[in-house]
Amino acid sequence: MAKPKIKLDTTKIKSFLVNHVEKIVFGGFALCCLLLLYGAFGLERVTQTPSELSQLAQRARTNIDGSTFDLEQSGIKVVEYADKAKAVTQKVTLDGFEWKPVDPPVWPAGNKRNQPQLLALEDLKVSTGVGAFDLKPKGQVAAAPAAAPAAAPPAGGGSMPRAGGAMPRRGMGIGAGGMGAGATAATGNAEGKPYAVIVGLVPVDRQAKAFAETFRGVSMPMEGDQTPRYKPIRNGIAAQVERAEVIPGVADNDLKWQWIDASAANATEKARYNGNSVEVADASVVDPAVTEPLPPLVGSEWDAQEITNEKLPLAPKREAAVAAADPMPMPAPAAGEEADPLAAAPAAAPDAAAPAADTEAEPAATAAAGSSPYLLFRYFDFTAEPGKTYRYRVWLVLENPNFGVDANYLTEPELAANDYMRTAATAASDAVTIPFDGTLLAGELVTPTSDRELGTSVLLEQWLPTGGKAIAVVPIAFRGQLLNQQSDKVMLTDSGGGNPRMGEKGKSVDFRTETTVLDMRSEGEGRDQPATLLVLDPSGRLKVRKAEPRFGEIEKQYDEAERASKRKDKDKDDDDALSSDKKGRMPSAGGMAGQQQDDKKPRRGRRGNDDGGR
């Protein structure tokens, strides 16, 4: 018997599912609910009453509170996974992975070399002034090589330009050994220049002790471990000197500092020195590496208050002169009398252009020659702009005794990277103002009248860019007057003061002293006595200016030059009139003979012939 074949019709199957799928899903859901309900009836039931359950919980709590389990005594180590997770974010250190040389040294290893403590410049002081300097003509001096980069090297890296030649040693400065001090007499090319001089104390003895302590017992001793050597970098000075212009409203932290020797301009000016002035400081504290020589000042001497420090000894001859100096006495006022404002004025450093006219005596040396623990730091800035106010700061630069040493003998390999070491910078100096090219010379007191207060006569001197000086007379100046003026009635002289003559008509000179007269008094009794002035200089300092000894001589030269100029102008006018008279005549045979006879007559107004008619 044949088996029946089952034939599946997919169309009917799909139709069935489409028509009854909701019923199938609902039936499955109902079946699951029945199973859950059946399972719930089959679970174990809690037979305790609520009061019994509360007693069981209280019994368990009492048992836990009475437990004597100690985690530390149990020895169970609890892992702080939070701390472990933090360690993942930290850098991996090389501790425990120190490299040991394959071929260690055969000799016993000593102490490794370190960097000694570097001592900064101390007692920074900046003075400004105007002076006449004996300089070579600009065409006779080769320009200094350009210095780049303009920015200062970073404190922790980079390279300073190396200076050629051997390092000068202490005590071999200007005036020591074969280095002469140079001439101070003018050679005919004196120029007036404003300047700033930066002075400080180099703690060389304490720096040497720091070197000796650092390198005592090191495994690799080197030459220079016991003696610090200051390393000249730019323009022969072992320092980085910076200045910043002080601008009103700008905080000190926002000042823009400029390395002066990043440009060759300052070095070019110093290359024009025609010799040097005689050194004021003792040779034991002068080192060319940190002490610039004195520029050749003409017509006056350097003031020790500006160019050295009171803690340093002076040259023997200078000490004797200072000890013999007797400052101008200032008598105390009588009872009930008003104090003299000049006598109460604090002593201040005078201008270098006229030290003889100031009252301050130079400071006496406080240390014996050769016993000072300091060297003199001195640096001149000739590139600051007149009328502007600046602050200065200084880094000292030393040779690096660790330069080129194998890293195995150093505490840190970076110590051998650079051939120089730089100290910390000094604090910014007090603000100083660069003066203009003009100076004033005090004259005689002008007595008051019913319609005029007390005054004084002064002379204004102005150095000219082309060389020489211009001098103007101020017949009377009063208290509170700012001595700036523009005048076309000036006397011109050579750099040394010779060949006085009046300037050309129509060409004026702008005299800029930026000095204000505050008060004045007479040095004697009676009329026309020499005056002593209390003035406020361009940097805001009080100064006492005595009557200039050359005042009368210069005033006489001025009067003679003015009379000579008037005679010259009158002679020129007479010549012009005679020439015009000749041109107005009609030439003829008879007139030519008459004109020749007229020419033989002495001309009117010639010196010695018709002076009485002037």
Image (spheres, grey):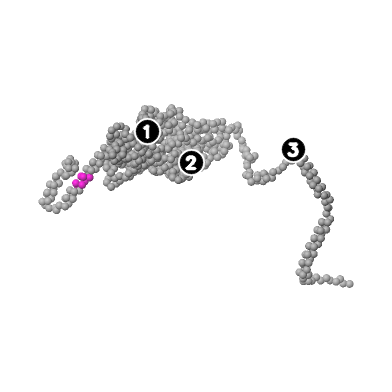
For the image, the number of numbered tags is 3
Mark nearer the viewer, 1 or 2: 1
Q: Secondary structure at mark 2?
A: loop
Above or below for 354 versus 88:
above
**Residue underneath mark 3:** 73
Q: Residue placed at 13% from the left, 49% from the top?
A: 595
From the viewer's perspective, is 122 left or right of 565? right
Amino acid type, residue under disc 3 in the picture: Gln
**Residue underneath mark 2:** 160
- Residue 135 appears in the rendering: no
Cα distance between the residues tagged 3 and 1: 89 Å
Q: The N terminus lies in which quarter of the figure?
A: bottom right
From the viewer's perspective, is 513 left or right of 83? left
Do labels 3 and 2 touch, CB within 8 Å? no
Q: The C terminus lies in which quarter of the figure?
A: top left
From the viewer's perspective, is 512 left or right of 415? left
Amino acid type, residue under disc 2 in the picture: Met
In the rendered image, residue 71, in percent from the top left (x then y), is placed at: 74, 40
Magenta residues: mostly which secondary structure?
helix
In the rendered image, residue 506, in percent from the top left (x then y), is placed at: 28, 47
Amino acid type, residue under disc 1 in the picture: Ala
Q: Which label's residue is closer to the chain start, 3 or 2? A: 3
**Residue underneath mark 1:** 339
Camera-side residue: 544 or 466?
544
In the rendered image, residue 254, in percent from the top left (x then y), is placed at: 48, 45
Q: Residue placed at 85% from the left, 71% from the top?
A: 4
- Residue 450 appears in the rendering: yes
Location of residue 540 (image quadrant): top left
The magenta stretch is: 569-575
